[in-house]
Structures are given as structure tokens and as C-alpha cells.
Image (tube, coloured by chain):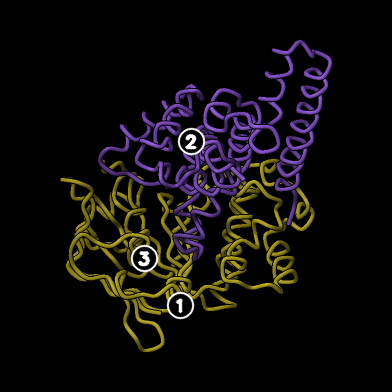
Chain colours: A purple, B yellow
């Protein structure tokens, strides 16, 4: 869920940042890059403060729910997808766009084609976003509370089991997490291969 | 399709790159724009392709009895004019998909036969399954010409289409230009710094120097009896600039 939201937000924003010029673009780019290195626990702390009872969105009652965890994960993953998409689209030969326009493409069609040309990089951005989400511990523990049956995820379960000395269970969970990550990345890499084919 | 330009000025920032009092291009011409590098030939071609709006003045094209400008032409009118660039950029797809790109942009689906015909015209049928990035420079330029011709445009704009190509590829592209003109009656506007190519292909030639038109006229006139001494110097190969 968090990856889907981050992808839907991150790819258009990254493409827009790569293809447009406006005052303050450098500052915004610096902020995005800073966001790419944002310590997850800081993102979790901010979400915690916003959703806590005394926070501005405390009335929503989202703290220690899946919703809070998704918000934290989106904050962590979106800058990664924006940043990688931005640099990938900016790396596409700038002469492509006028040539597509000269073949009759609308602005949207040309942008879509540029995104297509940057697809390998864009998929790397999604992979990076997925990695940041699936490996996250601090933020989801802070805003989710690691409540059994409700907000406990594999990473927080590994921390809990390790603390209780159940290393065999923690290790088993770690292997399952790795397998999930492998399968998801294999699908994304397969997508990279398929999009490079002939018409 | 007719072009009319009057009092046209184009600037990039403070720099004036084009200043043309008047120019008329008739349907069915092969009109060559010649001049040294930096004369404004490619800029003029982009304006004719409605890819940029002139900074000042009028550039209009008449199509089916109606007059259009950069501001008023819809996507349907813009699609009647297709341009091939000096350095073609192909998409990271197969050759066939690259030739089909303009057709797909237009939402067409049943285009496979036309794509094959276009590939045959540029003598690239044997490479139709190849990836675009494996082609040589000359083959890439031929793909770029094929992806333009397959669209059957009313106007074909060619920006130095044979620059840096070997004689074999130059000949293929020049033959295609002639064929497109004679068989389909396409208006062709060709930018070239090669006066010999202009002489071989064009029905009319314009010499552009420093953003201004020095002389416009039938090819024979510009080469054999130019009215401006600068035209004589340029056409004879003397360095003007």
C-alpha cells in the first residue's frame, strides 16, 4: 500500500522536476535529496507527533494503526522514488522530446515517452522505495506500537523475538523477509527486461 | 500547404538569430535553405515546424484553405508537418517500433504493413528486428527518415539529413527525397550547408547569412546567375564567413 502511494506520487513528481524549470527548483531538489537520506526514525517521530493526542491530527485516532505506519513509510519511500525518477528522466537525451514533438506528439505523449526511456532508472527507484519500506523498523515501531495482530510487521517481530532470545524464530522471519524481497525484486527486474523488448 | 512569413524576428534572450522581411514557400517545392553554420537555418526550420513561436512577426501556413500559426494550429494541423533532425534520437526499442512511433502517437493500430513498406523504402527491411542502438549512424538516420515518411506528411522538414554520412547513405536519402517529392508531391524544406546537395535536389534555394535572407530564387538562378555578390561567393565555395 505504502509503495503504491509512493510510486503514484513519486514518478509524476520526479518527471515534473526533471522536465520543468522554475524558481526554487534547486532548493526543492536539495530538499528531495535530503529526504532520500532522512533517518526513518525521524520520519516516525514527526508522524508520531502529528498523530499523537496533543498533535494537530490527534483527533483522527490513527496513532498505533496501520494508517500511521503507511504514512511513515510513504514519507520515507517517496523522496527516494522522486529523486531516482528525476535523475533518470533528466538523463534521457534532451533531443528526444523535440523530435517526438516534431513527429506529432502532444506534450503528454512526449513526457510519457521520456518516462519510458527512463524506465530502468524508474524501476530502480521503485526497488529502492520497496527496500526502504520492507526493511523499516524504527518508524513503524514508533507509530505502529508493534501491537500483536494489528501493527506488528516482520521487521518489528524480528526485533521482539531477538530481544526475547528466540533467535531461531527471528532468523526464520528474517529468511522469509529476504525471500519476499527477492520475489518482489525479481518481478520488478522481470518488468525491466520485458519493457526493453521489441514492438 | 503554403508558408507565408512576414517581418519575422526571432530572438534567444538578447540575441537576434533571425530577421526575415518576407518569404513564401509554395506547395510541392523542394526548398533548400543554405548558409554557413550559425546562419539561423535550423532555427527557421523549427519555426516552420511550429515547434517554436517567432518572437515577432508572422509565420503562417495555409492548409485546406485555412491559415494557421503556431498559436492557432491544433495538433491535427501540426501533424501535417513532420521534421527529421540532423542527429536522430531513436527510442530504446526495435527498429520496427521506432518507425511506428509517429503512427502510435496518432492512435493508429493497423500500421504493420505501412511500417514494413517504409523500412523497405529506406533499404532497412533486413534490420527490422534489430535493436535501434545496434545501428550505425547512417542506418539510424534512415530509420529517422522512415519514421517521418510513414506518416505521409504534407510538409517534410529535413535538417541536414545527410551531414556526416557516407556516400552510400547520402545517396539513399537523396533518392528518397526525390521520390517523396515526385510520387507524393510532398513539400520538402531542406536545410543543408552542402550547396552541391541543394543543387542536386532543390527546386528553389534560399541563402541565409547572419539570420537574414540574402537571396531566394530558382536553383539555377542562385547557382548560375546570382544577383547578390555574397550568393556568388557562397555558391562558388569561397568562404564568406
Query: What mark, if any, has residue B28 been given in the picture?
Result: 1
Badge 2 element = helix
Mark 2 and mark 1 on one chain: no
Mark 2 surroundings within 10 Å by alpha-carbon count, few (fewer than 14), some (14 through 19), many (20 or more): many
Q: CA distance from mark 1 to mark 3?
A: 19 Å
Q: Along the polypeptide, which appears first: circle 1 or circle 3?
A: 1
Horizontal arrangement in the rendering, residue B129 relative to residue B108 (left or right) = right
Q: Which residue is mark 3?
A: B50
Badge 3 element = loop
Output the chain of dot 3.
Answer: B
Horizontal arrangement in the rendering, residue B175 relative to residue A162 (left or right) = left
Instruction: Count all numbered tags in the image, as a single digit.
Output: 3
Q: CA distance from mark 3 to mark 2?
A: 42 Å
In the rendered image, is residue A81 in sight? no
Residue B28 placed where, x, y %? 45, 77
Output the chain of dot 2.
Answer: A
Amino acid at each position: 500500500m505504502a509503495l503504491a502511494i509512493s510510486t503514484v506520487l513519486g514518478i509524476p513528481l520526479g518527471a515534473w522536476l526533471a522536465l520543468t524549470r522554475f524558481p526554487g527548483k534547486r532548493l526543492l531538489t536539495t530538499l528531495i535529496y535530503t529526504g532520500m537520506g532522512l533517518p526513518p526514525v525521524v520520519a516516525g517521530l514527526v508522524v508520531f507527533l502529528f498523530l499523537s493526542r496533543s498533535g494537530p491530527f490527534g483527533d483522527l485516532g490513527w496513532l498505533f494503526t496501520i494508517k500511521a505506519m503507511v504514512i511513515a513509510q510513504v514519507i520515507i519511500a517517496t523522496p527516494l522514488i522522486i529523486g531516482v525518477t528525476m535523475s533518470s528522466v533528466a538523463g534521457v537525451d534532451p533531443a528526444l522530446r523535440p523530435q517526438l514533438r516534431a513527429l506529432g506528439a502532444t506534450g503528454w505523449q512526449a513526457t510519457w515517452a521520456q518516462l519510458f526511456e527512463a524506465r530502468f532508472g524508474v524501476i530502480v527507484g521503485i526497488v529502492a522505495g520497496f527496500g526502504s519500506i520492507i526493511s523499516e523498523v524504527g518508524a513503524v515501531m514508533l507509530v505502529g506500537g508493534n501491537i500483536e495482530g494489528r501493527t506488528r510487521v516482520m521487521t518489528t517481530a524480528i526485533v521482539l523475538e531477538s530481544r526475547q532470545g528466540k533467535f531461531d524464530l527471528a532468523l526464520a522471519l528474517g529468511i522469509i523477509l529476504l525471500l519476499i524481497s527477492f520475489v518482489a525484486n525479481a518481478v520488478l527486474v522481470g518488468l525491466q527486461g520485458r519493457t526493453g523488448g521489441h514492438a | 500547404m503554403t508558408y507565408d512569413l512576414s517581418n519575422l524576428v526571432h530572438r534567444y534572450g538578447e540575441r537576434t538569430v533571425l530577421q526575415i522581411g518576407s518569404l513564401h514557400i509554395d506547395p510541392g517545392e523542394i526548398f533548400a535553405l543554405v548558409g554557413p553554420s550559425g546562419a539561423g537555418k535550423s532555427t527557421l526550420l523549427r519555426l516552420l515546424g511550429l515547434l517554436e513561436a517567432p518572437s515577432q512577426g508572422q509565420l503562417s501556413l495555409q492548409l485546406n484553405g485555412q491559415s494557421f500559426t503556431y498559436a492557432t494550429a491544433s495538433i491535427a494541423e501540426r501533424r501535417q508537418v513532420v521534421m527529421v533532425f540532423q542527429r536522430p534520437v531513436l527510442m530504446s526499442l526495435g527498429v520496427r517500433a521506432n518507425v511506428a512511433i509517429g503512427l502510435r502517437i496518432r492512435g493508429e493500430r493497423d500500421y504493420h504493413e505501412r511500417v514494413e513498406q517504409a523500412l523497405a523504402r529506406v533499404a532497412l527491411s533486413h534490420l527490422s528486428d534489430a535493436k535501434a542502438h545496434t545501428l550505425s549512424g547512417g542506418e539510424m538516420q534512415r530509420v529517422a527518415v522512415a519514421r517521418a515518411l510513414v506518416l505521409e506528411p504534407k510538409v517534410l522538414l529535413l535538417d541536414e539529413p545527410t551531414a556526416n554520412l557516407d556516400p552510400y547513405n547520402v545517396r539513399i536519402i537523396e533518392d528518397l527525397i526525390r521520390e517523396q517529392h515526385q510520387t507524393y508531391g510532398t513539400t520538402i524544406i531542406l536545410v543543408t550547408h552542402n550547396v552541391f546537395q541543394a543543387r542536386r535536389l532543390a527546386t528553389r534555394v534560399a541563402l541565409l547569412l547572419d539570420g537574414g535572407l540574402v537571396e531566394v530564387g530558382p536553383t539555377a538562378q542562385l547557382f548560375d546567375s546570382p544577383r547578390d555578390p555574397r550568393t556568388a561567393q557562397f555558391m562558388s565555395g569561397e568562404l564568406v564567413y
